[in-house]
């Protein structure tokens, strides 16, 4: 039995029709793109084409794109560059960064490291729906700042952030705006030119291209990037042999999307998710849909079920052939509550009891029907077990410590 894959926000499968393109590209891109011979030149051409394609899709210039090992690297690179620039241009004060409290951990941990190194880091809170508080951002921007980092759409809740307003506030104060647009790529309209976004980070594997590839767009002029990996490649700003195969796959998928040869079924997915959430609520009392009532990605339902541990439910779903997630892929496998839900004001039990279903190309209503068939019994068993057991050891420990 093929698994039902509802974890596209963690990583998306190859879109249908790309197998042959992938195997051809794999055969053709073995040459080192820095080599001068024909095999190297072929790999270089493939990267150049991919860069053109990604830039055409994003509405920016190909000179503004840099290939990375993924969005985590792109995010760290932006923060590293902002710190270096601040120290160079304003040696009289500590660098000051503003990040939203629901950023991906590659941003949050880079910000923590910056703080340990002497920077001031302000965390812009979100409201109960998971939307960044513009009023707080506005007041934080009254003092000099060197970077604002607020993502496009959250990977756990799917909640879309007020990117245009953030960009407007940042432009008014001439503060560079970094937008982690990983979950928006291919799913939401995205035009960088004129958007007011200074830096945007992307990851290839969220659109079905290989893992370990990403790109950073830098749309403004000036010295906005510092080398983080030293080497001759990519204008000596990002050294290391590029990944022609990975870049080409990302480029081909973006080209197909741009030309309408591949369609992201946003309307269909959105309708299926709304129906799924409605039916879940009817079948399982105490269902909470996080981020309900605000704009969300068409493909994401992050749902909490009072009185259970989300991880146990995930394992039971896995045994039924349903692959979902407890939120951020990096935290699955641990019983930590979702930081995003905690930032939205959820209590730790609810944050621990939540399961994310994220769909994409190839998902059908039958997939959701299967979940609706098995989930009520799984949640019922989990609730009964949790009642019989009492609070989990971790929660008991917290209570004892308190
Ligand atoms: N930013 C967001 C919003 C993500 O969802 C992810 C991946 O989960 C990343 C960054 C990291 O991307 P990568 O896996 O390419 O490092």
Image: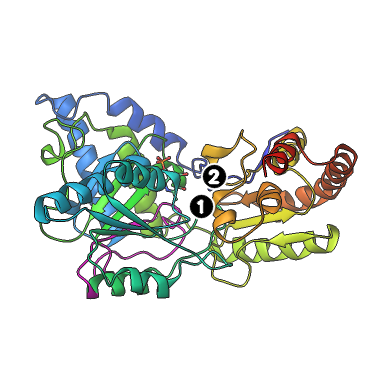
Q: Quadrant of the N terminus?
A: top right
Q: As drawn, is 48 to the left or to the right of 109?
A: left
Q: Is residue 173 magenta?
A: yes
Instruction: Give the dominant element type of the magenta stretch: helix, strand or loop.
Output: loop
- Image quarter for residue 74? top left
Q: As drawn, is 302 to the left or to the right of 212?
A: right
Q: As drawn, is 252 to the left or to the right of 56?
A: right
Q: Which residue is mark 2?
A: 328
- Highlighted magenta segment, given as a residue range: 172-197
> Percent from the top left, x then y, of residue 134?
41, 73
Disc 2/disc 1 C-alpha distance (Å): 7 Å
- Image quarter for residue 96? bottom left
Q: Is residue 367 above or below residue 319?
A: below
The verdict on label 1 being within 8 Å of ligand 1 is yes
* Mark carried by residue 155: 1
> Percent from the top left, x then y, of residue 151?
40, 58
């Amino acid at each position: 039995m093929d698994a039902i894959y509802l974890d596209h926000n963690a990583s998306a499968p190859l879109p249908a029709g790309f197998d042959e393109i992938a195997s051809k590209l794999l055969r053709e891109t073995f040459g080192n793109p820095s080599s001068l011979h024909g095999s190297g030149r072929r790999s270089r051409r493939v990267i150049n084409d991919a860069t053109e394609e990604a830039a055409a899709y994003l509405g920016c210039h190909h000179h503004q794109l840099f290939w990375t090992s993924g969005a985590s690297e792109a995010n760290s690179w932006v923060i590293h560059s902002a710190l270096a620039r601040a120290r160079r241009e304003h040696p009289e004060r500590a660098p000051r960064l503003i990040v939203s409290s629901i950023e991906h951990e590659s941003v949050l941990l880079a910000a923590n490291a910056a703080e340990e190194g002497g920077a001031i880091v302000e965390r812009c809170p979100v409201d109960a729906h998971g939307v960044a508080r513009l009023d707080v951002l506005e007041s934080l921007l009254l003092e000099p700042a060197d970077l604002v980092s607020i993502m496009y759409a959250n990977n756990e809740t799917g909640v879309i952030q007020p990117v245009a307003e953030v960009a407007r506030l940042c432009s008014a104060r001439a503060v560079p705006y970094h937008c982690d647009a990983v979950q928006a790529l291919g799913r939401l309209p995205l035009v960088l030119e004129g958007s007011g976004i200074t830096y945007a980070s992307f990851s290839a594997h969220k659109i079905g291209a290989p893992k370990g590839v990403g790109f950073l767009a830098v749309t403004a002029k000036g010295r906005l990037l510092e080398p983080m990996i030293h080497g001759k490649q990519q204008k000596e700003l990002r050294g290391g042999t590029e990944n022609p195969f990975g870049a080409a796959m990302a480029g081909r998928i973006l080209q197909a999307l741009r030309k309408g040869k591949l369609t992201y079924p946003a309307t269909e997915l959105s309708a299926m998710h709304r129906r799924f959430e409605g039916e879940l609520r009817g079948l399982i009392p105490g269902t909470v849909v996080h981020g309900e009532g605000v704009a969300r990605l068409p493909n994401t339902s992050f749902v909490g079920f009072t009185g259970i541990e989300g991880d146990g439910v995930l394992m039971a779903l896995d045994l039924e052939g349903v692959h979902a997630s407890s939120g951020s892929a990096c935290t699955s496998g641990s019983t930590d509550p979702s930081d995003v839900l905690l930032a939205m004001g959820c209590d730790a039990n609810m944050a621990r009891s939540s399961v994310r279903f994220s769909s994409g190309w190839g998902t059908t209503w039958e997939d959701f029907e299967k979940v609706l068939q098995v989930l009520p019994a799984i949640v019922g068993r989990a609730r009964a077990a949790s009642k019989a057991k009492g609070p989990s050891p971790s929660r008991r420990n917290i209570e004892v410590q308190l």
